[in-house]
């Protein structure tokens, strides 16, 4: 998760727009039957639903999925499906290549936070029973808000969070943190210890081409991306 996302969340549930993505308004669909939709995957549901608001909840690190499951179970036991909708831990899939083998991992987009969809009282407050059901759950911290009061996410923030949470339609590409011109140090292989400059990156194969100086001459070395790290001069 990027520092920018963390800062945006801790200042309040504010998200930056995904670069290059279209900022289209999602349809708002009236729905009073939350229970009937609880077993539908988040991607297949309407982005936003009328009379329901989203809140950001701080939870114990690495306990996001456990807290979500506990809350879902408590909501069902207490029969509060008409007040509490989706409870989400947004994730994304990333692919890594090492030794020619690919591995797809699912990583949390907002570690330490979960997102809860709720129906509010007519005065805009979270129903008291729902508030205490959530707050008394092990691993739950505080709602994100201002002046100690939970603040609902804006429509734009909800749209971005749900868009980021949609499962990828295609296999994820390898995410390389290096760009052409970066100074790196080779940490594995016959050129271990050499520093050089990234000349090219190949996300599909997980390779980088590094220009290193060998015997006083600059030469290109093509190696797997995990065999380099950012250099001291970077």
Image (tube, grey):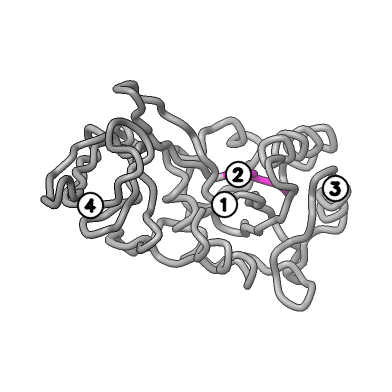
Residue 152's spot in the image, x, y percent?
64, 66
Instruction: Please tell me whether mark 4 sits on a helix, a strand or a loop.
Output: strand
Foreground tag (1 vs 3): 1
The alpha-carbon separation of the residues under discs 2 and 1 comes to 11 Å
User: Main SS type for the magenta part?
Assistant: strand
Picture layout, residue 55 above or below residue 164: below
How would you rate the neighbour count of disc 4 (Cα within 10 Å): few for under 14, some for 14-19, many for 20 or more?
Answer: many
Where does label 3 land, which residue?
Answer: 133
Q: How many marks?
A: 4
Residue 196 magenta: no
Where does label 4 land, which residue?
Answer: 198
N-terminal of the pair, mark 3 or mark 2, is 2
Picture layout, residue 5 above or below residue 139: below
Instruction: Please tell me whether mark 1 sits on a helix, a strand or a loop.
Output: loop
Where does label 1 land, which residue?
Answer: 110
The alpha-carbon separation of the residues under discs 1 and 3 comes to 23 Å
Residue 228's spot in the image, x, y percent?
35, 43
């Amino acid at each position: 998760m990027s520092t920018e996302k963390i800062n945006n969340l801790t200042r309040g549930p504010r998200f930056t727009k995904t670069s290059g993505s279209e900022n289209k308004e999602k349809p708002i669909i009236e729905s009073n039957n939350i229970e009937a939709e609880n077993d539908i995957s988040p991607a297949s549901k309407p982005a936003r639903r009328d009379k329901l608001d989203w809140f950001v909840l701080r939870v114990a690190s690495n306990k996001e999925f456990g807290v979500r499951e506990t809350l879902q179970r408590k909501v069902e036991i207490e029969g509060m499906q008409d007040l509490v909708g989706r409870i989400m831990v947004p994730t994304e899939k990333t692919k890594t290549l090492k030794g020619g083998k690919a591995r797809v991992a699912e990583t949390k987009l907002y570690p330490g936070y979960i997102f809860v969809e709720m129906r509010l009282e007519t005065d805009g407050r979270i129903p008291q029973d729902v508030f205490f059901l959530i707050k008394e759950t092990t691993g739950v911290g505080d709602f994100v808000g201002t002046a100690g009061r939970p603040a609902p996410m804006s429509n734009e923030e909800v749209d971005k969070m749900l868009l980021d949470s949609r499962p990828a339609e295609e296999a994820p590409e390898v995410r390389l943190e290096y760009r052409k011109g970066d100074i790196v140090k080779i940490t594995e292989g016959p050129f271990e210890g050499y520093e050089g400059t990234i000349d090219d990156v190949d996300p599909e194969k997980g390779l980088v081409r590094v220009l290193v100086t060998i015997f006083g001459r600059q030469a290109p070395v093509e190696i797997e991306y995990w065999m380099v790290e950012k250099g001291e001069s970077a």
